[in-house]
Each structure stands twice: as C-alpha cells, then as structure tokens.
Amino acid sequence: MGRAFDRLEHDVTELTPTHLRADILRHLTFTLGKDADHASLYDWRMALSFAIRDRIVEPWFASTRKTWETGHKRVYYLSMEFLIGRLLEDATINLGLRDIAESAMAELGQDFRAIVEDEPDAALGNGGLGRLAACFMESMATVGCPAYGYGIRYEHGLFRQRFESGRQVETPEDWLSQRHPWEFERPESAYTIGFKGEIITRDGREVWQPGETVLAEAYDTPVIGWEGKWANTLRLWGAKPTTQFDLERFNRGDYAAAAEPEALARTLSRVLYPDDTTYQGKELRLKQEFFLTSAALQDILRRHLAGGYAVADLPRHVAIQMNDTHPAIAGPELMRLLMDEHGMEFDPAMEVARACLGYTNHTLLPEALERWATYTFGNVLPRHMQIVERIDSWHRRTFHPPHYVGIVKHHEVRMGELAFIMAHKVNGVSALHSDLVKQNLFPELEKLHPRIINETNGVTPRRWLKMCNRPLAGLITDTIGAGWEADLDRLKELEPHVADAGFLTAFGAAKRQNKQALAGWMQAHCGVSVSADALFDVQVKRIHEYKRQLLNILETIARWHDIRQNPEKDWVPRVKIFGGKAAPGYVVAKEIIHLINDVAAVVNADPLVGDRLKVVYPPNYNVSLAERLIPAADLSEQISTAGKEASGTGNMKFMMNGAPTIGTLDGANVEILQEVGADNFFLFGLTAEEVVKRRANPDHARDAILASQSLQDVLQMIAEGRFSEGDPSRYHQLVHRVWHHDYFLVAADFDAYRAAQAEVDTAYADRMRWLRMAALNTARSGFFSSDRTIRGYMADVWSVEPAL
Ligand SMILES: *Cc1c(COP(=O)(O)O)cnc(C)c1O
C-alpha cells in the first residue's frame, strides 16, 4: 500500500483556507447531504470536523504502520474515565490549522468561535483522574509514545448541573444524541465478555464457563499530537448483546421481552458513575470494570499474537497501566487469559503479568479504596475469585508477610493490595502523595517488595495554555519565539523579561482581556455584573469536604461583614468565583453548594458593598468552563486539608495561566511552591503532620472557634439565618458540624487563611508587584507539562522509547 498511500498524503503545511473550504463543502454535500444555503451551525460544525479529521487520519495510519513495522513496544492506558472535553479546536491547533480553519469558515460566512462552542463536551469522567487520562493521551501523541487508551464509551457522561433556588439539580448528559464526528465504529473489533457461571474442567484444566455474556465493540478516536507528527488511538468500548434479537418472541407480540437482552447488555456502557471519591459496592460497577479490562486485555493479546510474537514475550512489547484500582481486575484477568486460554503455568504467567502491569494510586481517602465483598466478586467473577486466592496464597508462601497483609481479608477482595502485588511499579502522583502512599497506605508491602515511585502529574500546555489563552500564548511567542508548546521548560526564558515594565504591562493586558471576556460571559449567563478591575479569585473543582470550599465561603462571609463594618476603607475589589459539581448522593457537599449560592444572593444584592465584593457560581463546571475561567483568574484557590489532595492538576493549569496560588502544603502545591518560590505563593495552614496531631485533640474545632472572633461572627450569622431568610434552620447542621466535628479542620485553618487573603490584597494593590508574581508563575510552570510526566512513566515504569 506504500506508494498509493504516499500519494494520498496531504501536506498540512501547504493547506490554504481555500483548500480547506473545498473540503468542508465536500463534506457538507456528500457526508451530510446538506446544501450550504440550508446548513445549520451543527451541519457546519460536522463538515469542518470531518474535514479536520481527514487530516488526522494520515498521520494516524503512518504512526500505526511504523509501530507495526518496527515492533515497537506499546503502552496501554486503562482508565474508567477520560474527561476529554471538546476536540475540534484542539485538533486544529495540533495540526497547525487553527487560523486557516477560522479563515475558511469566515470565507463561508461562518463564525469559527460559534462552531467551536457548539461542540458538546465529551465528559466521560468526574474530575482530575479522568482529565489526567485525557492529558496523558495528548502528551503520549506529542512525545511519540506508541499508545492506546482504553475506556468505556458511556452513553451518558457526567450529569449536567443546574441550580434551583440555589440547590444542585442533576439532569442526564447526552453527548451522543448528536453525531460524534471524531470516532470510527469498529464492528469487526468485538470481544465476548463473560460474567457469573461456573468453573468446569477441560483437558484437565479448570476453565470458566460464563453464565452471561455481552459483546464489547470498539469505537476508535484518533488522538493527534503537537504539530501532527504522531497519533495514537483512544479505543472506547460500547456494550452490545451477544444474543440474536428474539424474533419469535417479537412475532408473538412480546415486544418488551424481545428487547430485554439488548437493554440489559447496554446498561454496561450506559452511565458513568458520578463519584470517584467514594466506593460503592455495586455489582454493575464491578461489571463495568471487568467489561473494560477484559475487552482491553483480549485486544492487547490479539494484537501481540498478530505480530507473530510468543505469549511469553509479552513484556517486551506491552506495558499496561492501571489508572487507579478501577481496572485492577487486569491482574487476575491477564492471569486467566495466560493460563486458561494460552496454557501457561501459574509461575511463568505471574512473571509475565507483573512485568507488564503498572499501577497508579490516586487517593489516600479510605472511603475511595475499592474492596469487593468476596460474595459479590465470587458471584460475578468466579474464576477470578479462584485466581485471586491462588495469588494470595502464592504471596503468603513466597514472602511471608505479616498476617494482616494480603488481598482477601475479612471476606473482602482489596483491590489496592491486588494492584500492588500484580504490578512491577506502583506510583503516586506528587512527591508528598507518593511518600504518604509509602508510609501510610502500603508500608508492609513496600518493605517486602519496594516498588513505589513518584510521577508528579502534569497537564497538556497545548490545551491549557496555547488553546485556552490566546492573548497570553501570543505574548509568550512574541517574547521567546515559537516552540515552547512542546518544550515547556523554555518558559524560563520569560524570567529576564519580568524586570521589564513593558513586558509586565503586556502580561497584564493579556490577563485583562481574558477577564473582560469572562465578565461579559458572566453577565450574559449568570446575570451578575462584575468589574474587570477586581481581583478574580477562583476555586473550581469537584465539591468535596476535603477541598474545603466551605473555608472559602466562610472567608467570603467574613470579608462581606468587614466591608459592611468599614465601608469607607480602601478595599481591594474581589470577585469570588466558584465552580464544581457534587456527587448526587453527597448531602454535605450539596449543602455547601446551597450555602455558596445563598451567600452570593445576599452579597450581590447588598448596595453597601457594591463592586467591592461579588460572588459568582456558574453552573455545570466542565472542561470547557475551565478553559474559560482559568485564563481569567488572578488567584488560584488550592486550599485542601493537607494530606488529602493527592496531587491536583487544576493548580497547575492556573499557574501556567499566570495566577498565583493561595494554598496549603498539599499534593503538587508543594512542588509548585518549590518551583515558583515562597515570594510568589500565598502559603497558609497546617501541614499534613500537624493535621494528624491536631485531630488528636477532640476539642480542636471548639478551641479554634473560641480563639477567632471573626469565625464566631461568621458562624453566628449563618446560624441566625442571615443567608437563608425564612428558613433559619437551613444551616444548623452545617454549623453544628463545624463546632463539633470538623474532620477537615476548617476552623483550625480559618485565621491563617484570612491572614493569607489579606496578604493577597496587599500584593494585588501594588500592580507591578502583582504582575511580576503572575508572570513568574507562568515562567516557572514548565515542570508541570504532562510531557514531562509521560517521559517519566516511559523511563521509570514502561521502559519504552519514543518512536519519533
Ligand atoms: C483540571 C480539572 C479538574 C481537576 O481539578 P482539581 O483542582 O485538580 O481537583 C476537574 N475538573 C475539570 C473539568 C478539570 O478541567
């Protein structure tokens, strides 16, 4: 196919708007069957997306071919979540076609921005973990690491959030109700996935006879790297019935029963679980996890054998990464395939499996660590239960761990321990987190087999700087030249310019342009008018007690109260911006959302306060909203209880976009502080060690409240119903919890947080000082590119070289 293929190849560098326009019109006519006079925004978006996708297909084929021809090792990233967001603008940027696409659309009388924003977010994830997987896919393509991402093609991604009287209301998300132009359906790539059933003996071996089966069908989305030099595949599995449609039943008029197998099978890829911080022992979740993992492993083995290699050679060609414990069933499933399907003995199969597998831990929260009741596990996956027990007894015999260390304990299968034992490398996601994983989560296992390493998270600077912040990206290129996008350490070259008032002024102008755009958007979408001169103080992330949005809103109330007491003082105007969803069943988080909205209503309507304080909470925080908010932020709120946030990646996005952090010594904040320097970071609060000590005092909250007049006033106002007129008891439980429980030490850190916020005001009032801090945050953010993270995994975990 070589020659014919070569002639097909488009040269992206020669593409003109006129060429692209012809491609768009061709797709409009022949793919969509629309004529330009009657095309809607949706039709134009489809036509442009298909025209852009055409340009991705060729580098994609070329990358796949090269990997086949050279027998290069491939990385397989298994993740229950991929929080992708929109793809159109990102694809045009990586192909170097963004401006050409804009001109082509303009020639056709269409607004590129409107088309880009018409695309629904692919929200196949909850938050940081899923977004990390998406950034990794883009970085693996950029650095030329041959890779597949494996996930589930959920029909409904993360729910949509609206507010009704300040309360969160969830509605289903249906990104697939429109055509998804980026994927290719692969009906020929489908695997049978079994559940339940029994173990039978075949040729003297025990094998599994599933009682239920579904089909996993592949949908491939190409992922193009920077400058279009390499492309990988995101392969998402959709569930289908294995049984034929029951025509006999249908003809008898029993329509519901005829459709039943179809409906049952499809539930597996129907919805994303809307919570990744608590573990629910739901059978459907276990089935989803096995569905993804088994389909992926069958696909990996098929591809390996198709290359003509022996099964025992798997580790030379295959690295499999488990994104948290969700795909940790990969250990026993790979063992089953190697033993039951490929005839390997247990010991060599263990060696092969462990050499292939890596495990990334994402949380220390005990409530998030997956543990399956042996009853459920054994019922859904009887053969895997046997294999898990065999691995456990092999581990006991071989390593003599203390009696309390093992996989099956108290009638539960512990997925963290399973993942640890089956992986050759286990990694945490920030320096602090990796230390805590060693000391607190797996101390005994780590002593027996040291394998815990650190790979600090990162984010892709193509999406999170180049794409979302055109004013700043333009200034960077004007100042240090092109090429920083794939070599983010080059941002260091900005440092000498922070002594230049002209550069700082330009930096401030870029930020102001983003703030102005956000102010206009918030006016139109939230009905709140804010001044672009105010300090934009932003906390956007999932709503969780450990992330402490409560601390932020309590400080907001204290600030409001102070302004009312001293209206003539020279206040630095602030806009407090919140964003984030609470898991639908997380009552306390929903109460915090309600309080934020209630406070916003009171503060924003207070004529005494005016522009000195506004509170805005745009609903439905997602990747696209993050791209709008983060470039406009002056201040990044990263205020989790120390020891609870594994890494954070939002913190890195803000830093890149020139927003200094107010934060605790938690997760990757520690490394941000180290990179940017203490003068350019507003540090406050207890350390992880101090948190543990403070909690030992049962009166820690009471003591802290009694020591803080300001906190007493704030809690009193909430308790009196100042923010819940007509419903004074609305927040009694919340206030009671702060006084008497306060596991996340909001009270203990309140005064320190207020003091740090006062320092922020002082710094912001000195315009040149602030701009210098902001610019240094961008200049020193190079370390947080996910390209650096991926190179770390390639060297330390996957033993794979770039193919570029
Ligand atoms: C980056 C990102 C996150 C993670 O934010 P953290 O502050 O690290 O929790 C969550 N959701 C979205 C939409 C993101 O873009």
Image: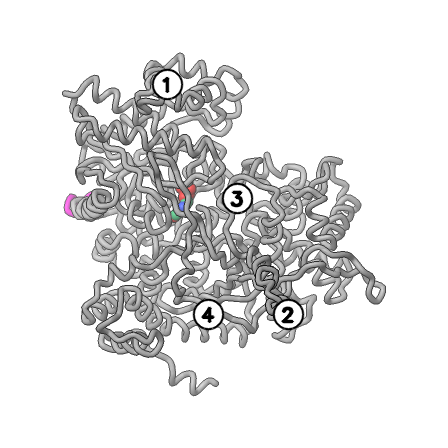
Question: Spatial distance from mark 2 to mark 4, Cα to Cα?
Answer: 33 Å
Give neighbour class at mark 1: few <14, some 14-19, many 20+ (Cα, 10 Å): many
Q: Is residue 217 visible?
A: yes
Q: Nearer the viewer, residue 494 or 510?
A: 510
Q: Is mark 4 within 8 Å of ligand 1?
A: no
Characterize the magenta stretch by its predominant secondary structure.
Answer: helix
**Quadrant of the displayed image that contains ligand 1:** top left
Of the two numbered discs 4 and 3 on the same chain, state the one appearing first in sequence.
4
Question: Spatial distance from mark 3 to mark 1, Cα to Cα?
Answer: 36 Å
Foreground: disc 1 or disc 2? 2
Across and down, in percent, residue 797 comes to 56, 54
> Can you tell which mark lies on residue 248?
2
Mark 2 is on which residue type?
Glu
Foreground: disc 3 or disc 1? 1
Foreground: disc 4 or disc 1? 1
Across and down, in percent, residue 387 comes to 74, 53
Question: Spatial distance from mark 3 to mark 2, Cα to Cα?
Answer: 50 Å
Q: Residue at x 80, y 60 (%)?
A: 200
Foreground: disc 2 or disc 4? 2
As drawn, 560 above or below 117? above
Q: Quadrant of the C terminus?
A: bottom left
Of the two numbered discs 3 and 1 on the same chain, state the one appearing first in sequence.
3
Question: For residue 243, what is the image quadrant?
Answer: bottom right
Mark 3 is on which residue type?
His
Residue for badge 1? 719
Q: Residue at x 72, y 39 (%)?
A: 411
Residue for badge 3? 362
Drawn side of residue 666 relative to residue 347, left or right: left
Q: Are marks 3 and 1 in contact (CB under 8 Å)?
A: no
Of the two numbered discs 1 and 2 on the same chain, state the one appearing first in sequence.
2
Residue for badge 4? 184
